[in-house]
Image (cartoon, rainbow, N blue to C red):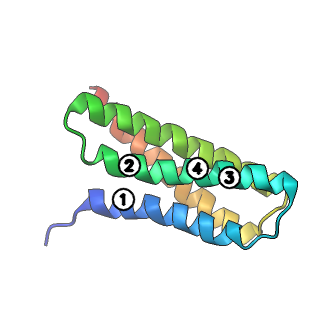
């Protein structure tokens, strides 16, 4: 049985964005959190969308470019998760899981980008 790791990884990136949107949308409005919430929605959904676009790239150069965007947006997502953690806006257990999954995305995509660069 062949496993489509690309599809599985695309699903992982999308699930991070979905989890962030679901968990953070139930938090009551606070001006301080509102700005961060919008930023993390954008970066996490961009991470997922660009990973999906990367898997449909028409050339190695396009794949490399999209993958670079994925890494950048994933790193932004991790930054916002760290901010949220330090400001105590969300329960720690939710953040630990999200940070772990986000760090995994960064590690795998950065390794893949190195491979493409060779």
- Residue 42: assigned label: 4
Q: Residue at x 15, y 67 (%)?
A: 2
CA distance separating discs 3 and 1: 24 Å
Mark 1: few/some/many CA within 10 Å (<14, 14-19, 20+): some
Of pointers 2 and 1, the one earlier in the residue sequence: 1
Q: Identify residue for label 2.
A: 51
Q: Establish if 34 lies above or below 61.
A: below
Q: Quadrant of the C terminus?
A: top left
Of pointers 3 and 1, the one earlier in the residue sequence: 1
Q: Establish if 68 lies above or below 20.
A: above
Q: In terms of secondary structure, where does tag 2 sit? A: helix
CA distance separating discs 3 and 4: 6 Å
Which of discs 1 and 4 lies nearer the camera? The answer is 4
CA distance separating discs 2 and 1: 8 Å
- Looking at the image, do the residues carrying marks 2 and 3 touch, with CB atoms under 8 Å apart? no
Q: Quadrant of the N terminus?
A: bottom left
Q: Quadrant of residue 91?
A: bottom right
Q: Residue at x 34, y 40 (%)?
A: 112
């Amino acid at each position: 049985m062949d496993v489509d790791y690309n599809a599985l990884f695309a699903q992982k990136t999308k699930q991070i964005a979905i989890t962030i949107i679901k968990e953070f949308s139930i938090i009551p409005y606070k001006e301080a959190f509102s700005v961060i919430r919008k930023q993390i929605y954008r970066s996490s959904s961009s991470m997922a969308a660009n990973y999906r676009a990367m898997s449909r790239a028409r050339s190695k150069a396009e794949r490399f470019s999209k993958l670079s965007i994925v890494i950048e947006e994933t790193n932004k997502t991790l930054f916002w998760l760290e901010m949220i953690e330090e400001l105590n806006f969300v329960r720690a257990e939710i953040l630990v899981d999200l940070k772990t999954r986000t760090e995994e995305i960064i590690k795998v995509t950065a390794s893949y980008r190195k491979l493409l660069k060779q």
